[in-house]
Amino acid sequence: MADSSSKDVKAELLYISPSQLYTKEKPYYIASPPAPGIQQSNETFESKETKITNTRGSESFYSLEDYGFEWIKYPSDASLETNYDLQTYIKDMEEVLKRHLRAEKVYAYDYVVRFNKQQVYRPLE
């Protein structure tokens, strides 16, 4: 891979802190108001300086096996403006990933749509 140092930036990111508690229960966060007496989250975080690399131009270097993610190209002209468009796009993505990963089942359980830096979140139906 070519030297990517010019593509690197450093930033403070929050990571979940190691905790003995997590040996007994998984970290959780309840997005809606929890029931009385229930803690909304058991997560604790720590800040770490982290190198972030712009992967543009070297996408093929990254593999799921080595990096935990990979880039795949999928041309789409989906508008994502209506719920029907979004649901169709999500089903298409499930099929693309199913074929690419040779999986029996792929289920999209969450998503974020970004339009000009504005995030739109709509629950899957």
Image (tube, rainbow, N blue to C red):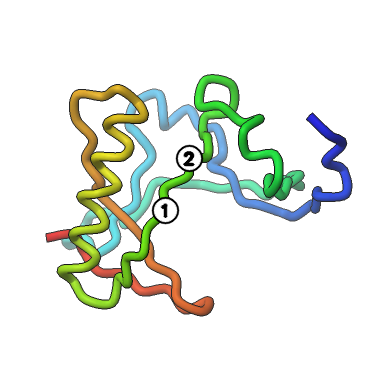
Q: Which residue is mark 1?
A: 75
Q: Is the residue 23 above or below the residue 123 in the image? A: above
Query: CB atoms at circles 2 and 1 under 8 Å apart?
Result: no
Apparent side of residue 67 relative to residue 32 in the rendered image (left or right): right
Give the residue displayed 53% in from the left and 42% down from the top.
Answer: 16
Q: Secondary structure at mark 2?
A: loop
> Which amino acid is tagged 2?
Ile
Give the residue displayed 51% in from the left and 47% down from the top.
Answer: 44
Give the residue displayed 55% in from the left and 32% down from the top.
Answer: 18
| Disc on res. 72 | 2
| Label 1 crowd bin: few (<14), some (14–19), many (20+), radius 10 Å | few
Nearer to the camera, 33 or 2: 2
Residue 118 % position (x, y)? 47, 78
Q: Quadrant of the C terminus?
A: bottom left
Apparent side of residue 92 relative to residue 53 in the rendered image (left or right): left
Q: Quadrant of the N terminus?
A: top right
